[in-house]
Amino acid sequence: MSALAEKTGPFAFLARDFTASIVVFLVAMPLCMGIAIASGVPPEKGLVTGIIGGLVVGALAGSPLQVSGPAAGLAVIVFEFVRDHGLSALGPMLAGAIQFVAGVARLGGLFRSISPAVVHGMLAGIGALIVLGQFHTLFDAKPMSSGLANLAAMPGRVLGLSPTNWQSSELALMLGLVTIGGILAWEKLRPARLALVPGALLGVGAATILAATLGLDVARITVPASIGAAFTMPDAGFLGLLAHPAIITAAVAVAFIASAETLLSAAAVDRMHDGVRTDYNKELRAQGVGNLLCGAVGALPMTGVIVRSSANVQAGAKTRLSAILHGGWILGFVALLPWLLREVPMAALGGVLVITGWRLVSVKHVTHLFHTHGLMPAVIWAATFLLVVATDLLTGVLVGLALSLVELIPHARWLKLGVKEAASDEGHHVALSGAATFLSLSRLTQRLEDVPADRPVHLDLHAVRGMDHTTAEMLTQWIARRQSAGAPVRVSGPEPLLKPLQAA
């Protein structure tokens, strides 16, 4: 019997959840503020989202060890929304309502059917836009209105530096580089016993101490004197914004991206531990409640976030209490130590975001797709990435989804997927027939997850006429998850179908 089975209740692992919550809090603080700045809003708005993500969503979440808060994946679309309409409560509230309804309608599985090439291409594009924008923050300058404009202005920003006459730009760049260097050096050189201490905190701390000690004249973050001032209720006329189709479109885009990122993160968190599995529909409902509240108090929208979630698992968290407590630590810090936050240079947070954005531009995803599944997934990834950077987020995602349909053409005659199950003393037999594509992925995923966890499984693909990369990726993860839990899985079928699954 596992330890989780022996202990139950919200305080069963109080000591481990308590220490894990402190680690998550330390990771979350600079990210919450930095993502707010990248989104074009004051840093306290990101902290409010982190508080709600911990105290409210942490208590309601369908993924107990996942941590919710402001996400880099939403920074670009929120920046454009704020630039054009201000931080209207309507956007996050509508997105939250859509998520909640989707959870009630049990549509959580549908978001897992989105092509991995589209998702990773979108995240890479967002990462590139964050790097291009925050590059200018390193010089104490404001980012431009688009990725291409930021890219075009980069050479002039560098050439404008003076090696002999250091002004705010040169000083800010130094602090940004200290932050980046501190993060990278700590990750390379940190002792094993201090592995959970976040490099972002140390990098920002070093830059803050340097700026304060030398009295450097650089831009610093602004924090209200009272935490209450960070909560702003919508004005009486905010519902009139329903007449703007752009706001409705932005809300739908936020709901779609936030839900996809949340559920992908939850699936990744499930692979990190052997505790309670994610209830995807419950998680969607919790995220919907969180975004409704964020809109009501004028904060940033939220998602489940993988960096903070992985830190939570690695720090030894066992229950949702850790995520809840981390929200309490953020609230206490902002309420009791706002003066300390005001000492943090903007360029330091820019440095954190340059690292964060750069890591979102993960070339290993597209190379994996190309080598494992062929050219088409790589084309989908590249098209999504380039259009997100060159045009806007929604265009890139829609084109990527449209290109995903091209994968269906070879399987047009056998789009219906059959799933037959048989149980015997030797194990569980699952036979698929027809074409295994993202159109049937939600139903297939549910059937596979319902297979008893302690039974050997034989997955029979002999009658499968074709398989797209989205289904192959899901099956690879499912096989790996069962094998890591000690349940044998045997897969049989034509060699072309087995080859992409051999990574499991």
Image (cartoon, rainbow, N blue to C red):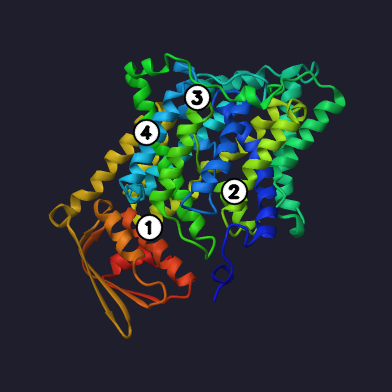
In the rendered view, tell whether residue 118 sits above or below residue 227.
below
Dot 2 falls on a residue whose secondary structure is helix
Task: Tell me the quarter of the image containing the N terminus.
Answer: bottom right
Q: Which mark is residue 79?
A: 3
Q: Mark 2 or mark 4, which is nearer the start of the sequence?
A: 2
Q: Position of residue 450 (x, y in %)?
A: 34, 66
Q: Residues within 10 Å of mark 2 (few under 14, many from 20)?
A: many
Dot 1 falls on a residue whose secondary structure is helix
Q: Residue at x 59, y 60 (%)?
A: 318
Q: CA distance from mark 4 to mark 3?
A: 16 Å
Of tags 4 and 2, the one toward the viewer is: 2
In the rendered view, tell whether residue 189 sits above or below residue 214.
below
Q: Position of residue 408 (x, y in %)?
A: 22, 50
What type is the residue that disc 3 sits on?
A: Phe
In the rendered view, tell whether residue 76 sits above or below residue 449.
above
Q: CA distance from mark 4 to mark 2?
A: 33 Å
Q: Mark 3 or mark 1, which is nearer the start of the sequence?
A: 3
Q: Is residue 346 left or right of residue 145?
A: right
The residue under label 4 is 396
Q: Is residue 373 visible?
A: yes
Q: CA distance from mark 4 to mark 1?
A: 22 Å
The residue under label 1 is 473
Q: Position of residue 286 (x, y in %)?
A: 45, 44
What type is the residue that disc 4 sits on?
A: Gly
> Which of 152/484 is in front?
484
> Which of 332/73 is in front?
332
